[in-house]
Image: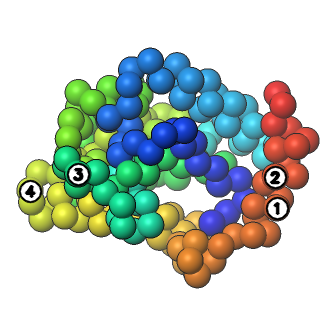
Amino acid sequence: MIEGYLAIVPYECIGSFSQMPRETFPELKRLRSAVLGFYERAYGVTQATMFYEQGRAGAGASVAEIGGFPLHAHLCSLPLALDLHAVLAGKFVRKTVSGPEELSVVARDEPYVYVEDADETAVYVASSSEGRAELTGMRLKTVIANLVGYPERGSWRTYPGDLELHKLKENWRIYGKG
């Protein structure tokens, strides 16, 4: 999508961060800190955007038997500040959280979108069956690609981002060690 796009992904296929064991969140916190430090060193960015959509797993081709959620939890991150809250707040119910470790209580077994930036951390859930269907099928990458002025980069199928990935890997070799 853009240079610096990273995803933090669990070792095992987990349907959502709301289903992750509590003992895994300290490692997630360390990885988030590593990514934010990398962004500051490599790109001079002090405010980044991190988000999690209810997983995609190849457009939902692989789903959990219970709940039907895609098996592909991942925390996406971008080296820029975007106001995804403004995009989501008009459509979904906002619940303020301090971090992803609260998702099992706040979002439970419902589809959700988790967003954190420098100023706000929140989870967005649906208030209706129509909203639930919209959340389940939502593709934030398409929305973000439009927000940053590159609508053609909203899908890895049509824009794999090989050049950006190459630059990211080079920057990680230089700045990723911290």
Please name the residue that numbered disc 4 is placed on: 128
| Label 1: which secondary element | helix
Q: Position of residue 114 (x, y in %)?
A: 38, 43
| Label 3: which secondary element | loop
Badge 3 local density, few (<14 within 10 Å), some, or many (20+)? few
> What type is the residue that disc 3 sits on?
Glu
Q: Is residue 64 visible?
A: yes
Q: How far apart are labels 1 and 2 at the CA level?
A: 5 Å
What residue lies at 62% left-to-right and 30% top-to-bottom? 31
Give the side of residue 138 with respect to residue 25, left or right: left
Please name the residue that numbered disc 3 is placed on: 65
What residue lies at 43% left-to-right and 51% top-to-bottom? 72
Q: Quick check: 15 above or below 158?
A: above
> What type is the residue that disc 2 sits on?
Lys
> What type is the residue that disc 1 sits on?
His
> What type is the residue that disc 4 sits on?
Ser
Q: Position of residue 92 (x, y in %)?
A: 22, 53
Q: Are marks 4 and 3 in contact (CB under 8 Å)?
A: no
What residue lies at 47% left-to-right and 70% top-to-bottom? 142
Q: How far apart are labels 3 and 2 at the CA level?
A: 36 Å
Q: Are marks 3 and 2 in contact (CB under 8 Å)?
A: no
Disc marking residue 169: 2
Nearest to N terminus: mark 4 or mark 3: 3
**Res 158 quadrant in image:** bottom right
Mark 1 vs mark 4: give the one in front.
Answer: 1
Nearest to N terminus: mark 1 or mark 4: 4
Disc marking residue 166: 1
User: Which quadrant does the C terminus fall into?
Assistant: top right
What residue lies at 32% left-to-right and 34% top-to-bottom? 19
Q: Position of residue 54 (x, y in %)?
A: 35, 52
